[in-house]
Amino acid sequence: MVRIKIDTNKIGYINVFESITGAHVKDCIIDEETNKVIFLVKEGHAAKSIGKNGINVQNIQRAIKQTVEIVEYSDTPQKFICNFFRPAKISNIYISEKSDGTKIIHLTPESDKGLIKNKLVRAKKFVKTYYEISDIVVH
């Protein structure tokens, strides 16, 4: 069972997001270091969240005074990782399991390796929470 910790800051951001977009938010990460809020939206809600010409993202950013990133959730960790690192292209992705049962995602980027490295720490938080995967390794 996935356990998510939601504090009052997250609740406030999620309420603003949902009232502006009408999309459902599963979770969000507030990254104070980069002054960014990453919203994890229900599968199929990314376009609705962004809005025509990105208008919803602009309105959310104005309302919360933070940079916003939207990631679409998926039931499969492989598809989620592809969504998370978009627009980077991933040429190969698989999951391995160690003898102690810990799972690791391995991925090989086709493009934008720098983008993947910049987003890696935040991606690890989501995959650990939602898929019980302990690490992501970039090859």
Image (tube, grey):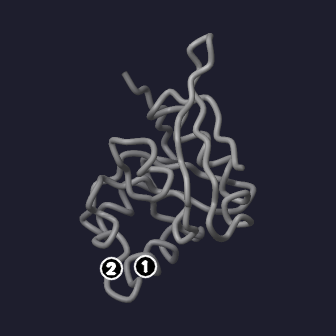
Mark 1 is surrounded, within 10 Å at the Cα level, by few (under 14), some (14 to 19) or many (20 or more) other residues, namely some
Q: Position of residue 123 (x, y in %)?
A: 59, 48
Residue at 65% x, 34% y: name it: 135
Q: Which one is in front, 53 or 88? A: 88
Residue extending farthest bottom: 53
Q: Which one is in front, 19 or 24? A: 24
Q: Position of residue 66 (x, y in %)?
A: 59, 68
Q: Which mark is residue 51?
A: 2
Q: Which one is in front, 123 or 109? A: 109
Residue extending farthest top: 100
Q: Which residue is mark 1?
A: 59
Location of residue 75 with respect to 3 vertically, above or below: below
* Image position of 112 (left or right of 101): right
Q: Position of residue 11 (x, y in %)?
A: 42, 47
Q: Nearer the viewer, mark 1 or mark 2?
A: 2
- Kind of residue at disc 2: Gly
Q: Position of residue 94 (x, y in %)?
A: 52, 41
Location of residue 49 with respect to 131 vertically, above or below: below
Mark 2: secondary structure: loop
3D distance between C-alphas at marks 1 and 2: 10 Å
Mark 2 is surrounded, within 10 Å at the Cα level, by few (under 14), some (14 to 19) or many (20 or more) other residues, namely some
Mark 1: secondary structure: helix
* Image position of 88 (left or right of 52): right
Q: Which mark is residue 20?
A: none
Q: Which one is in front, 69 or 132? A: 132
Q: Earlier in the sequence, mark 1 or mark 2?
A: 2
Please tell me in which quadrant of the rendered image residue 33 appears: bottom right
- Kind of residue at disc 1: Asn
Residue at 53% x, 48% y: name it: 93
Q: Quadrant of the N terminus?
A: top left
Residue at 71% x, 50% y: name it: 139
Tell me whether the residue at label 1 lies in contact with that at label 2, contact meaning CB atoms closer than 8 angstroms: yes
